[in-house]
Amino acid sequence: MVDLPGITRVPVHGQPDNIYEQIRDIIMQYITPKESIILNVLSATVDFSTCESIRMSQQVDKNGERTLAVVTKVDRAPEGLVDKVTADDVNIGLGYVCVRNRIGDESYEEARKEEARLFETNAHLSCIDKSIVGVHVLAQKLVRIQANAIAKCLPEIVKNISAKLDANVSELEKMPKALTSIADATQAMMRIIQAAKESLKKLLWRGEFDEYPEDNTKHGTARFVEMLNRLSDELHNCEESNLSKDFLTEEIKGLEDAKGIELPNFLPFEAFLRILRRKVERISYLPIKFTEKYWDYIDDVVMSVLTSHWEMYYHLKVFTKGAAHNLVQKLREQSINRVKEIVEMEKLTGYTCNPDYLMEWNKLMKEQDHFINQISGTNMRPLPCSVDLQGFGKIQVEHLRQHSNVSTLQQAFALKMRMVAYWKIFKVRLVDSMALHLQYHVHNLVHNDIDEIMKELMGPDGHGIKMMLVESPAIVAKREKLKNSIKVLKESKDSVAKVMDRIVVYDAYLV
């Protein structure tokens, strides 16, 4: 029971200017909860419908279901009181109780006797039903109302206690049991490693994301496809894939550098290789950057998965992260070296058995005569500054007119078309190689290499196993907290059950 302050509108004796707002906020804080019973104290001398306290209680209890009115000072205004409490114009759901306050130095017993005499002898007050007069009636009514309120709340309280109890029991059961022997620790470690290994297989190899349905950053197979698509886009949009810039300039220079004592009109393969090597060298950073990124991603996923599986063993979790990082870094270095080999192989020679190469080259070569004629043709005045070449768009050709040797232009054109046809094959092959290389290493990681972490954790002296026997203070504290909480909740559940039993007995007694 909380005795709230009376409502004051005008500050006096140094009270703050917002005294009304402060008192109103205090009152509303206590009467708003649905579990509260509002004991609205009214003076018999006032008009109930104008009372501020009635207005406030109606704001939070519109139907008056938890509002009980206590009418005081009945001896000062007995006339018409019976009408006021029976009409209930202000909707007091739990009804009224009329009482007489103690006056002066009256004892409690004296006040109760005087109250009984007043309601028996007063011409106006004696008309009021005896079931709503007297402090003793108020006490009984409050007990009954409170009992009913508690009875309504108890089932929900029991439900909440049971839910919390079940949750704590479940959480305690999920916690690893304290390990007391090397054998138990070894079995626990093997179970955790296998569970982590299975999680990594799902995420990085099989594309199953049931363990992380909302966290798509760990959906490895999907992220690998995104990385490969970005590599493909970068290769297609890089400077080396710009077909029209400085058209034939590099090819003409390559032919001049490859000149030797040889048959005329013979297209030297060395000129093609020099251009190919330069182009491959200029894009060599892309597959290496791709490899670094996917190993960064794999490192993040492996660390996250292993950390989650080792969460309960703090000391070993730190050791596990170190072992996992060492493994990934070793595989990363091997992978990057392999990718560098792939790039070097592409620079070594130009080769493909893909029939698309010859088909593409033959198609491109059909434009040669038209192109050469546009540059050196004698019947065109003025000569065009650009040539519309199929597959290339508009090509600026002014810089080519300084080369008067038509044979050189023809050879440069043929060399350019060979490189264009081959470069298209090369880009696709490089992306395919990166995809196969990635799949190969991911497969080995999740199926075989991850076992190296187990070996390192076990160690020759069983150091990792011994660490599992030492629980972190946080885990110990959490286990004890859960045990204490379960104990308290069980006791609370029993206590509430006893209260409910007493309510049933009390209701039976009243009946």
Image: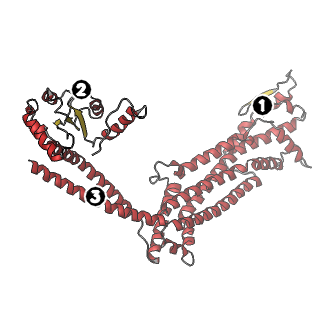
- Residues at discs 1 and 2 in contact (Cβ within 8 Å): no
Name the kind of residue labelled 2 in the image: Ser
Q: Quadrant of residue 365 in the image? A: top right
Going from N to C along the chain, the mark reached first, 3 or 2, is 2
Left or right: residue 63 versus residue 137 is right
Going from N to C along the chain, the mark reached first, 1 or 2, is 2
Tell me the SS state at disc 1: strand
- Residues at discs 3 and 2 in contact (Cβ within 8 Å): no
Name the kind of residue labelled 3 in the image: Ser
Label 1 to label 2: alpha-carbon separation: 94 Å
Q: Is residue 489 visible?
A: yes
**Numbered disc in front, either 1 or 3:** 3
Numbered mark located on residue 49 in the image: 2
Left or right: residue 355 versus residue 252 is left
Q: Residue at x 91, y 49 (%)?
A: 260
Q: Residue at x 39, y 32 (%)?
A: 12
In the picture of the structure, the residue carrying the numbered disc 1 is 395
How packed mark 1 is, by other alpha carbons closer than 10 Å (few <14, some 14-19, many 20 or more), is some
In the picture of the structure, the residue carrying the numbered disc 3 is 492
Q: Position of residue 263 (x, y in %)?
A: 89, 47
Q: Residue furthest right?
A: 261
Residue 111 vertical placement versus 457 (above, below): above
**Numbered disc in front, either 1 or 2:** 2
